[in-house]
Image (spheres, helix red, strand yellow):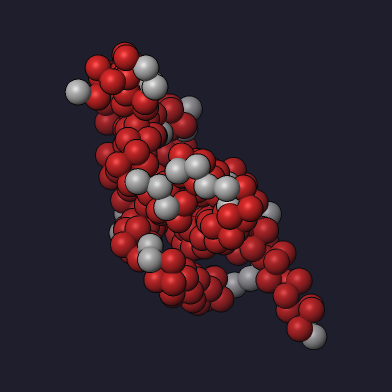
Amino acid sequence: MIASVLLKELQLCWGFARRDLGIGTLPVPLFTMASLLFKNTPAKEMVRPIAAAFVYGIFYLYSFVVANQIAGVEEDKINKPDRPITSGATSLQAATIRYYVLSALYLAYSYFLGLEKYTLLWIATTYAHNFLGFATFGPTKDMCMGFGAIAQLMAAWTIGGAAPQMGWKWTKTITIFMSWAIPIQDLRDVPGDLKAGRRTTPMILGDMPSRLHITAGIFVAQYLLIKDCILEQRDDAVGALRRQ
């Protein structure tokens, strides 16, 4: 009985999250590992924080995708009918209960790790994105993805325990890149977004201005990457000069 319930839960979890594991869960233990390596943590002491980060990453992703699929049932009936709600594997009501339970467990787990401020940021962002219409307007959608990167990566870095200043330099660069580059996926979806009543960044700016906007963001992110995360970290005279 217990085994069958657990198996069903694992199947539902996989159905909700399988398309987004690479961007939603895996960066958390990887960024935690970077934090641990940055402070020269011995290998034998890395296992527990990386495992804790992996669990945190599952909560981070799972709570979002459930909310996202609750809000996108009608669209998923056409584009992704194999998802749990549209396939009938679970009901909309059950998914809604699941979302609130997951959010509560996520917050409790983050309190245990001392990460509640990042978790509250992501819970608020998830709610705004999926239930307050932020996902239907380009600038607010892009902003939500930026807040998501901050919540995800700073939590991961904190689990590793390294100095937050370095973690923020990397997080800032990645967030700028994501926030500016996220409309790339909307360039091809303009006809569908128009029918769905969305106003994405390419629809607001136009095709060519939107491409220039994305390009500018990539250049800014690359500049910050070279300046803050490469040159200033060089262990030689050039790095010392940059840090003065």
Q: 114 or 86, which is in the foreground? A: 114
Residue 105 percent location from the top left of the image: 48, 74
* Residue 157 in view of the camera: yes
Which residue does the image show at 32% across and 35% down from the upper left? 169
- Residue at image position (45%, 56%) is 159
Question: Which quarter of the figure has residue 226?
Answer: top left
The total number of labels drawn is 0
At horizontal 67% and vertical 58% (from top left) the residue drawn is 14
Instruction: Please state which of residues 176 and 36 is positioned toward the viewer in this rendering.
Output: 36
Q: Is residue 131 above or below residue 202?
A: below
Give how far across and how far down residue 95 sits, in percent: 54, 71
- Vertical comparison of 184 with 50: above or below: above
Say left or right for 137 vs 45.
left
Q: Is residue 127 above or below residue 139?
A: below
Q: Residue at x 79, y 78 (%)?
A: 4
- As drawn, is 87 to the left or to the right of 142? right
Residue 16, placed above or below residue 214: below
8 sits left or right of 192 in the view = right
Q: Quadrant of the N terminus?
A: bottom right
Residue 32: give x, y in percent of width and height. Answer: 50, 48
* Res 129 quadrant in image: bottom left
**Residue 214 visible, this orientation:** no
Instruction: Please tell me which residue lies in front, 223 or 69.
Output: 223
Residue 133 % position (x, y): 32, 54
